[in-house]
Structure formats: C-alpha cells, structure tokens
Amino acid sequence: MKQILEPTWDLSPLYADNDAWEKDFFRIRPLAEKFASYRGRLAESPAVLAEAIAAQDDFSRLAEKCYSYAHLRSDENTSNNANRARVDRLEGLFAELSPLESWFDPEVMAIDEKRMKSFLDSPELALYRRSLLELLQERKHILSDKEEALLGTLSEVMGASNKIFGILNDSDLAFGRIKGENGRTVEVTHGSYGRLVESEDREVRRRAFHRMYAAYRGKRNTFAATLDATVRRHVTMAKVRNYPSALAQALEPDRVPESVYRDLVTNVRTGLPAFYDYMELRREVMGLEKLDMYDMLNPLIPKCSREYSFDEAFELVRAALAPMGGEYLSKLDLARSQRWIDVPARKGKRSGAYSGGCYDSYPYLLLNHNGTLDSVFTLAHELGHSLHSYYSNASQPYHYADYEIFVAEVASTTNEILLSEYLLANTDDPAFRCYLLSHLANDIRSTVYRQTMFAEFELLIHELAAQGEPLTADLLSEKYYGLNRIYYGDAVEPDQDIELEWARIPHFYYNFYVYKYATGMSTALLLAKNILAGDPAKRDAYFGFLKAGDSKDVLDIMRDAGVDLSRPEPVENAVAQFGKIVGQLRKEMGR
Ligand SMILES: [Zn+2]
C-alpha cells in the first residue's frame, strides 16, 4: 500500500525556534509596564491617550503571538511537558500582569464629557474613535466609584449559581447504566448520551433518555434554584445598571436592538409549518404512530461510507468553494503551500478541530482527518474560519482585526452549505443525496429551530423573573413542556420527561447567547444563496464581510454583506430553504 504523507503545519514563520519564542516571552512584561506607565495620564491630551492605546495594543499583540505559538505547539502533542510548560508560564504571567491593565477602562470613562468630546474629534484619536465610543456608551451604566468597588468585591459571590450548576451537572450528577446495543451494559454519561440517542435501536434511545432524565428529576429543585438565581442576577444587574431589561443589557455589547431578538422568535414561529413537515417525514420513515423526543437524532439515512484522503477532501472543498472566485481560491492554495494545516490524527495530539493563530501568524488549522465525509465538512468549516481571519487580519489594523462572536460562525457555516450544494449538484446517487439533504436539514433543525426555542424560553424566564415570579421546578417544567408542544407539532407526542430538559442546558447560564446560533445560520444560508446566484456585486459584498473584522457594528457588517437582520427576510429565507430541503428529501425517498 502506498503511504500517504499527510501534511503538518509549519510554525517556523511564527517563531523560528524555541529560543526566538523565549526572547519575546521576556519582552511581554516590559510592554505591559510601559502601558501601565500611562496610568493617571489619559486625560492629559488626545496624543497621550492615543499613545496609551497603542501601548496596550503592542502588549496584547505580542502576548497573543507568544500564546498562539505555545498552545499550537502544545496541541501537537499534549503529553509533551516542555510544550505544556510554555503555556503554563504564559498563563502565570498573564495572571500577574492583569492588575496592570484593569485601570484603563474606568479611567477613560472618568474623563470629563466635554473634554472627551473634543478628544474624539482630534486627528490623533481618529483610528481609535470607534472603540472609544463603544466604551463610552457604557458610561451611562457605570455607578459611583464606591458602588463599583462594592460590586467588584461581590462578583465572585454573584457568579456562584453558575459555578454550582457546573459542579452539580458535571461532577455530582450520575446517571447510572442501561442495557445498550446488543444487550451490553453501558454507563450513561454526558459524553455517551449523545451517541446513545443516535442509536438505531429505539429501546436503547428510550432507556438512555429515561435514565438521564430520572437523574435530573431527582435534583430538579436544586437545578431550578441555580437557574433561578442566575436569571435573577441578570435581571437585578440590569436594574442596578439602568438597563430597561436583562435582554437589553445582554445585547448592548453587540449593539443589537431587542427587536432583532424578538423578531427572530416571531419569524421562526411563523416558519414552524416547515418544521412540522420535517417531523412528519421522520415519523413516516420511522413507521411510528407518533415520534417521541428520543426519535430526533437517530439517522434517517445510513451513514455514507465513502472515504476521502486529505488530498481528495481538499480538492472537493476547493471545487465547492469555486463560486467564491479565483481570489478566494488563491488563498485556499496558500493554506497548502504555506502549510497552515496540521492534518493527521496522532497519538497525543489534541482531539477535534479548530482554526487558530493570531494577527501575526498564519490562520492555522488543527484537524484530525479520518477520511469520513464529516471530516470533509470539518475541513470546509475550519477553512471558513481561517480565511475569515486571513482577510480580516490582512485588511484591518490590529486594533479592529478580531471579529465578534456574533459573526464568528457565519463564514464557516457558509462554506459548509456551499459544500453541501456542490455535492448535491454533482451526484446522482439517491442514497448519497438523501444523506446530504438529511445532514443539511438536521443542521438547520438544530441551529435555527432548536436554538430559537431555547432563545424563546430564555426570554420567557427572564420576563417572569422580572415580574417577581419565582422560577420553581414546576413552573420551569410547565413552560418548557409547553414550548416543546408548540415547536414540535402534531407528529410528536413528547414524553413528559422532556419538561426537564431546561435543567441540563448550560447555555441558559450564558445570558442570551443561543440566539446567535440561529441568526448565524440564517445569515449563512442567505449568503450562500447570494454567492451561488453568481452576481459579482453580491460576491464582493461577501468579501466586505470577510475583511471587516471588528471595524463596524455586527448588524452593519451583515447588512453591507447583503443580510439585513433587522428585517424578516433572512429567517424567512432559512425557513423557505428548509422547506425546500425537506421537500427534496421527501421526493428522493419516494414519499
Ligand atoms: Zn466553527
């Protein structure tokens, strides 16, 4: 058999060797001290403030460069102690240096308003104007020094409910064992549950589901208490800091209006009939009278058994991304010729896949390519992240290169959709087509529909808490079960235990985070459609997004790229595409 040498990444452009890294490591502290030397001076003049910001950027830019190398090296082989030691040394140093940084934001906000206004018009601060305005927006929510100091000392205590949830859920909760596939006894854990509910054997899925929720039922009052405390903290802090609501406070850093969040829920609800169709198709294919909640993740279509070498995977992804144009493809080729990618699985290598690196490095990719179709999708996904980073880094100054989480999954998801469309357009094999369609349908199900249901629940419980309603286990379960009935429709008769799902979702502790999955997927679906339409203006608009980094507000970036999230069209399009996919799937399956 011919041996295929799969490529590894080349970190030498980042640091030629460990000695070069050591030299930079010892430059970090002086840069932090230089930045700290501006303390107490920010109000002196626009030039001094600009120098201070530049000093802060110099420090964090070098710190990120050192950190990137340390963790990329460490991930190559996590059992290598010398590599791990570099990460530990940096983390120790950052902890030590953090007091040298925390003074900056309060001192900027303390600058007299009139004085700041003239600062902002000065040419010295032109580059930083946007980020300063963003920071100053918070000013109206800042309390007196004494109150801020008090809140600071209480911050650990106020985070206690999240911590208790984590310990209870991850360490103390045990689910026990069930009879798994082929009669073998298996332990139900957070890790194994995902595989068990994908089992082809309905009894295995049912047993895993009941075993898991029996454990949550036994602790449901404690879980309700941790969630209640967290939600109440969000509500109280919003009041303390003069926000109209917890939702408004959570959305402010992205400058997303509440209407975007509420309209998402309304528009996804309007699009539920397409989801009901999908559930009905599942029900028919599975030959059941009613689906249950443990019938959502077992594959409708047998997994595709085709194997792809890395070279084949790369060529496939390249062909699928051809509609992006030659410019994009030339950057994909750089990923290979400059060796951005660490491909093969190895003993000791960090598992999974990611896109990493920093402003001063290639946008490296760590993969564990195993030849499955999933790993081809992973390659497309991570290349989406890396090229987004590449273009933002190349087009923006360091200060604005880092894009926000709100847009972070858009480029990666767009690439996955383009890969799906390409594969669909180039195969006549009905089994493969069914597999691809069902893969895509499942992605939309889990991001657009499921995450929006979560988002609606999150909003509901914050509103109840704001009205002074205690979030008891009974109330949470009643509301959660009700939403499941609405979202899943008549083809599903949900097992009563699903009422406890709220207890196991860590995202409910993240403060209005999950809606970003739904907006991100809807955005990507519309962008992919625009790119495939072949209109050069729309393609250019897409590049505008890739290059924007954090230079504009996220909604403006997306609007300029052709997706206006303040309007219903992106979600309407997602729902329409979902309906089309389900229709195609139905046809391919002869139903
Ligand atoms: Zn991703």
Image (cartoon, grey):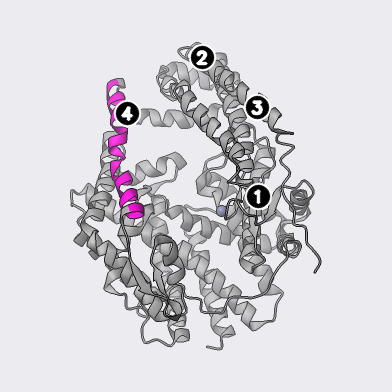
Q: Which residue bears the numbered disc 4? A: 152
Q: Is residue 586 left or right of residue 491?
A: right
Quarter residue 426 falls in: bottom right
CA gap, disc 2 and disc 4:
23 Å
Q: Which residue bears the numbered disc 1? A: 365
Q: Is residue 206 left or right of residue 313?
A: left
Per the rendered image, the range of residues in magenta is 146-171
Assign a secondary structure to mark 2: loop
CA gap, disc 4 and disc 3:
35 Å
Q: Are marks 3 and 2 in contact (CB under 8 Å)?
A: no
The residue at label 2 has a CB less than 8 Å from ligand 1: no
Q: Are marks 3 and 1 in contact (CB under 8 Å)?
A: no
Residue 320's place in the image compared with 149, above or below, is below
Residue 150 counted in the magenta span: yes
Whichever of labels 3 and 1 marks the residue nearer the N terminus, that label is 3
Whichever of labels 4 and 3 marks the residue nearer the N terminus, that label is 3
Camera-side mark, 3 or 2: 3
Which residue is rendered at x = 31% and y = 40% of the image? 159
At which x and y percent is residue 555?
Answer: 51, 46
Q: Amino acid at mark 3?
A: Glu
Camera-side mark, 1 or 2: 1
Quadrant for the N terminus in the image: bottom right
CA gap, disc 3 and disc 1:
24 Å
Q: Which residue bears the numbered disc 3? A: 22
Assign a secondary structure to mark 1: strand
Residue 247's place in the image compared with 501, above or below, is above
In the depicted view, which residue is nearer to us: 260 or 493? Answer: 493
At which x and y percent is residue 140?
Answer: 35, 29
Q: Amino acid at mark 2?
A: Tyr
